[in-house]
Amino acid sequence: MTGSELRMPEIDFAVARLPDLHEVLAELRAVEPVSRIVFAGKATWLLNDYETVSQHISSDAVLSAPAAYEPLSLTTVGRVLPTMSGRQHQLNRAVVSRVFFRGRMREYAQSLFAEEAQRLADVLEGRDRVDLVAEFTRVYTFNNIARILGLPREHVDRLQGWADRLMRSFSHLEDAEAAGREMAEYLMPLIESRRADPTDDVISLLTRSKVGDEGLSDEEVLAFCRNLFPAAIDTSTNSLGSLIRYALQDRDLWRKLPVDRELREKTVHELLRWEPPLVMIPRQCVESVEIGGHPIAVGDDVRLCITGAHDDPKQFPDPRAFRIDRGGSHLTFGHGEHFCLGTQMAKRVLEKGVEVLASRHPDMMLCEDEENPIEGGVLRGPRSLWVKPTGRTAQAS
């Protein structure tokens, strides 16, 4: 079999549930780190080891992020950071980084994020059985984004619906484009209003922040805000579910998380390596290149497999072991010019969410009759997370 032939053609990574993803990627990597797979019905190159992924994640010179993201992003959310280059990219990154810096995110964690987590933890009181994905992780994440943007909490259901439709752009493009238009009709009047009469929310900060005498246009602010909601599914919602699921299997860890900030930070860091919420990220070849002995042509689709890189034993010994003190760096938030500027927000959302939940419900347990598997070949996390908040089995009446 040559490198140009499909491996595992029966698996379409874009739609398969893949609870055994780590085993599948290890099997591919054992043959060679560069493979041909199926993604959304098309043959795609998969780069699946740490050295190869880290080499190509930092630059667009050969494997381009803008070329990969443009076909779907421009007609759904607009020209967002991964589609930008040159001066526009530099300006947008500079403005967004000023808004999403570490200090402000820590302030949000102590105020807005904590308030949302406490409010949702209240709802769990006295319940015998709860799906945390439906009633905590997803609502908590979206409410936090709505609040920092200055949007009413009662609009979150509508925002979630748009985000879900946007995330299906590779399989339902027309519906995703319609969701993008509907979201624009909702957000643009708010952006124009904040520019004229700013408050202290993120939309206002984005409209008035400048680098020198340059700032963002209303269209650029719209694209950023419109992309923020589906991006939250990528990271915070899936990762918080995976984090809670892991921590509930270690009672000692669950009890310590509310009172030990350093432990929370280390646990979140290792979780993001151990189970990245975004399995692979797209690139398109813009300059013919040979990678791993395989010629990749201009126009070829390529996926950089973050999960595969993190499972590479050459970089992370015993990679499927969850080691809180492992340390080191990982690629979950990218690297180089496309490093995710939402990193600080995502980490603070995860840390505060698990802190409050473990503090308010120290006896919480996973339901023994539910597997709650972590699934997905693109976005990865538990689709449901059934727990007993009190740790007790419901009594028959």
Image: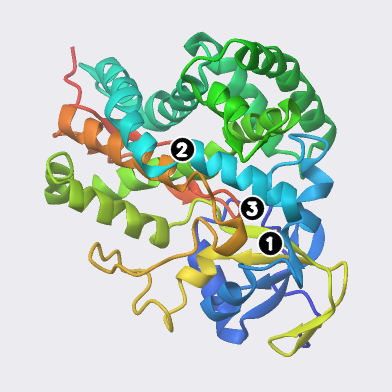
* Position in image of residue 312 (x %, y %): 47, 77
Q: Give the class, few, some or many, for how many residues have Cα within 10 Å of label 2's Cα (few <14, many ≥20).
A: many
Residue at 32% in and 37% down: 106
Instruction: Please tell me whether mark 3 or mark 2 is closer to you in this view.
Output: 2
Q: Name the residue under label 3.
A: 16
Q: Give the class, few, some or many, for how many residues have Cα within 10 Å of label 1's Cα (few <14, many ≥20).
A: some
* Position in image of residue 357 (x %, y %): 24, 31
Q: In which quarter of the image is residue 391?
A: top left
* Mark-to-mark CA distance, 3 and 2: 19 Å
* Looking at the image, residue 51 lies above or below residue 275: below
Q: Left of 273 or right of it: where is 180?
A: right
* Position in image of residue 318 (x %, y %): 34, 77
Q: Name the residue under label 1.
A: 11
On residue 237, the disc is: 2
* Mark-to-mark CA distance, 1 and 3: 7 Å
* Looking at the image, residue 10 lies above or below residue 210: below
The amino acid at mark 2 is Thr
Residue 85 in sight in this render: no
Q: Quadrant of the N terminus?
A: bottom right
Q: Which of 200 and 30 is in front in this view?
A: 200
Q: What element carries label 2?
A: helix
The amino acid at mark 3 is Ala
Residue at 38% in and 41% down: 240
Task: Tell me if label 1 and label 3 are in contact, CB under 8 Å.
Answer: yes
Q: Give the class, few, some or many, for how many residues have Cα within 10 Å of label 3's Cα (few <14, many ≥20).
A: some
Q: Nearer the viewer, residue 249 or 119?
A: 119
